[in-house]
Image (tube, grey):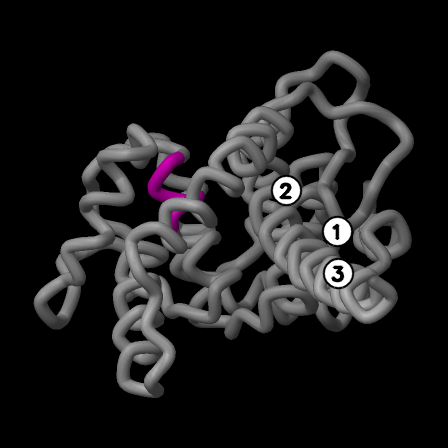
């Protein structure tokens, strides 16, 4: 497809597409003439990934460039890209993904990983959890092991389902936010999987907050009526 068709299919302006190309976020198409290029499904999926990162995660152009560099490197495993994407969804920069914590880590975190059977590896979310626990303790609202484990167990099954959903074959109809753009039964591309991961984290975080608030209201009303 030509540039105008790519813009229409991806719901992106031609100016934005040219900008993303200049910034190294979108690869060039196949050259047809000196001024015309042919674009394919991979370009559509990359533009949808950029849209999710920009609109849902608030990622900057440099952050997105760092992520797509990993996605486009066949030597880098998909888990590296997912770790960066998940850090961006949490408001962290790619440089904060992985690496040891800046301070002595709360021992409850390693205990949580052991209890849940999660790998004891460094990650951006692990560092963010340590900072959150430290901040809650400083504010006079510390979390004990029991509470942390209760939340962890509740989210273990949810995240297991999330990961399985990211790897499912793409199905019609096209969902421009989740990245489901391939035909039925096709293995999703790395762009699609990463877009699903970001969209899933952002949307499920919202769902968790809203359901928790609804639960608080419901239990409060029930208590007041008893």
Residue 198 x %, y %: 58, 51
Quadrant of the snapshot with the C terminus: bottom right
> Which of pointers 3 and 2 lies earlier in the amino acid sequence?
2
Residue 151 x %, y %: 47, 49
| Residue tagged 3 | 219
At 28% from the left edge and 34% from the top edge, which residue is drawn?
115
**For this rendering, which residue is in front, 198 or 67?**
198
Quarter of the image where one finds residue 178: top right
Q: Which mark is residue 139?
A: none
Q: CA distance from mark 1 to mark 2?
A: 31 Å
**For this rendering, which residue is in front, 87 or 44?**
87
In this picture, which residue range is highlighted in magenta?
Answer: 79-83
Q: Is residue 127 magenta?
A: no
The secondary element bearing badge 3 is classed as helix
| Residue tagged 1 | 36
Question: Contact (CB < 8 A) between labels 1 and 2?
Answer: no
Quadrant of the snapshot with the N terminus: top right
Q: Which mark is residue 196?
A: 2
């Amino acid at each position: 497809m030509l540039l105008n068709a790519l813009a229409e299919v991806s719901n992106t302006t031609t100016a934005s597409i040219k900008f993303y190309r200049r910034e190294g976020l979108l690869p060039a198409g196949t050259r047809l003439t000196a001024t015309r290029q042919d674009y394919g499904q991979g370009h559509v999926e990359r533009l949808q990934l950029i849209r999710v990162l920009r609109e849902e995660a608030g990622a900057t152009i440099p952050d997105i460039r760092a992520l797509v560099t990993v996605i486009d490197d066949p030597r880098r495993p998909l888990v590296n890209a997912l770790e960066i994407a998940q850090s961006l969804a949490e408001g962290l920069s790619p440089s904060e993904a992985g690496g040891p914590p800046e301070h002595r880590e709360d021992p409850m975190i390693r205990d949580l990983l052991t209890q849940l059977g999660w790998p004891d590896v460094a990650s951006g979310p692990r560092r963010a959890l340590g900072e959150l626990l430290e901040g809650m303790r400083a504010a006079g609202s510390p979390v004990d092991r029991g509470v942390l484990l209760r939340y962890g167990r509740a989210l273990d099954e949810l995240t297991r389902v999330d990961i399985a959903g990211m790897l499912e074959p793409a199905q019609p109809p096209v969902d421009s936010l989740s990245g489901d753009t391939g035909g039925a039964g096709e293995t999703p591309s790395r762009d699609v999987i990463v877009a699903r991961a970001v969209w899933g984290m952002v949307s499920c975080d919202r769902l968790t907050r809203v359901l928790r608030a609804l639960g608080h209201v419901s239990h409060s009303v029930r208590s007041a009526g008893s």
